[in-house]
Image (cartoon, helix red, strand yellow):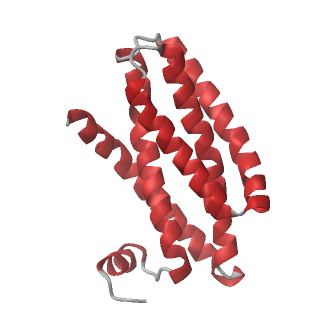
Amino acid sequence: MSSSTPARLFRLVCGGEIERSLRGILAVTLISTTAFAALWSYVGIWGVTHLHASQSAVGVMYVLDAIGAALSGYFGGRLSDRLGRRLVIAAAWGTEALAALALAGVGHRILLGFALVILAGTASGPGFAATNAIVADLVPETERESAYAAMRVATNLGFVTGPPLGGLLLIG
């Protein structure tokens, strides 16, 4: 492993090495979970303050989003078995990003805003499923425990840093 700054930081924080084949997927995981957490932390507030939706309607949106993400995660994992992990990951995160960007053009249309939020959440399910499944494809069985631990660290870092970054974007 090279002695690059991110690698040294990872060794310092986690006490281990990053498997070379995992570096790209760890970066994708960190970026995607950071973006996911930044959006999802504030989308409810956006629904109430910008779309003027009721709190109950926002709650229904979250329920539909959770159902969509759960179902799409299952079927997305199966789809990634057939079509390949990279294609599903790229399509999922690309769709989520486009749906999130489209939120800027919603205006005050509640149904369109909620539909885009639900689409973004539903698109994330296959991305998370395929991202986790690719670990088993890339890493020998004896090293999977530490590889999944590294994925968990990247995911946790994304979920911790996403909301503050989203808040900074709102201020800006």
* 38 to 63, vertically: above or below: below
Give the side of residue 83 with respect to residue 86, left or right: right
Q: Is residue 19 visible?
A: no
* 65 to 165, vertically: above or below: above
Q: Residue furthest left?
A: 172
Taking the spot 63% from the left edge, 45% from the top edge, the residue there is 125
Depth check, front residue: 31 or 113: 113
Depth check, front residue: 166 or 151: 166
| x, y percent for residue 9 | 33, 75
Depth check, front residue: 154 or 169: 169
Quarter of the image for the C terminus: give it: top left
| x, y percent for residue 48 | 40, 16
- Quarter holding residue 10: bottom left
Q: Is residue 48 visible?
A: yes
| x, y percent for residue 23 | 48, 74
Give the side of residue 47 with respect to residue 136, left or right: left
Taking the spot 60% from the left edge, 31% from the top edge, the residue there is 65
Taking the spot 40% from the left edge, 11% from the top edge, the residue there is 52
Tag count:
0
Quarter of the image for the N terminus: give it: bottom left
Taking the spot 53% from the left edge, 62% from the top edge, the residue there is 152
